[in-house]
Amino acid sequence: MEQGIKKAKANLAVKIAGLSLKNPVMPASGTFGFGEEYAPFIDLNRLGAIVVKTITLKPLIGNPPPRLMETPCGLLNSIGLQNPGLDVFLREKLPYLRQLSPPLIVNIAGKTIDEYAELAERLSAAEGVAALEVNISCPNVREGGIVFGTVPAMAARVTAAVKSHTHLPVIVKLTPNVTDITEIARAVEDAGADALSLINTVRGMAIDIKTRRPALASIVGGLSGPAVKPIALYAVWQVAQVVKIPLIGMGGITSAQDAVEFLLAGATAVAVGTASLVNPKALVEIIDGLERYLLEEGFGDVKELIGAAQF
């Protein structure tokens, strides 16, 4: 019997903002906890990167319930960035995460630019953090509650502040709840962003017809899941035309086919969110499916797909 026959493999490795990823698949912030919650279901070391839920300077209890509502093809959430705060993250969560091989990306949010800057500085001094993802879908309490990510100048100020307080790569996560997402993308690129994540959730609401009241206690929530995929894909394609920095595409990705679409539209990597809440093994299934697609279609390297859609 012939020995030494090797199974064909495709190269899945990519680089994002100086980070070397073994594959382009990672969890989206907010849907993966702090990683350890998914360890019973998947080998975390197989992921391209690990992205933890948003961290703020002080602990947040989040919004009152009800704060989750299933919709056709999606999920409305108004969690309100519930998290234990920076000190607890550094003391109790980071030691576990730094044992894992994928680069660790920490998502940060603040109520003021100074808070973003402090988060960046303190996380940059912590061993094991590979990059920062800046959540600019937050209201600026010093500017009357205007969301940082909806005004190009304000998004640029946050980005510049974070960049000036860290040596780590800075990935800015864009909100789709704007008139022209390319304006925001260009502004944060000019301010020094090393990569972009897009998109965050789409604003939406639901009404309980029995009580005739909003289904969410906060009235408005963020819509995620398959329903937003066409919006997210369009946003990635738009932004890929106007910036030179790499993109992490997200929004409704549930399969390898979805991931391929985002890569073809111009993303260098993809993040999987709501799908992991339905299927805890979604991330590794997408990694495996992506490699199968490459081999079946005759591609030797995943980078051949990036921006390769023909128009």
Image (cartoon, grey):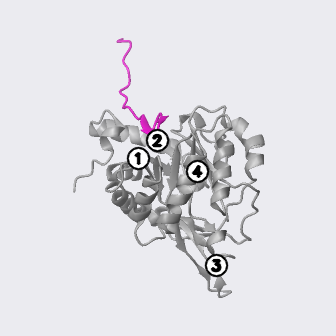
Q: Specify few, some or many for label 2: CA neighbours under 10 Å numbering under 14, 14-19, or 20 or more.
A: some
Instruction: Please give the residue where the numbered disc 2 appears in the rendered image.
Output: 17
Q: Quadrant of residue 82?
A: bottom right
Q: Amino acid at mark 4?
A: Val
Q: CA distance from mark 1 to mark 2?
A: 7 Å
Q: Nearer the viewer, residue 250 or 84?
A: 84
Identify the residue under disc 4.
162
Which residue in the protein does label 3 denote?
219
Side (left or right) of 186 relative to 118: left
The answer to whether the residues at label 4 and label 3 have Cβ atoms under 8 Å apart is no
Span highlighted in magenta in the image: 1-23
The CA span between labels 4 and 1 is 18 Å
- Image point 33% across, 45% down: which residue? 306
State which mark lies toward you, 4 or 1: 4
110 shown above or below 20 = below
Amino acid at pointer 1: Pro
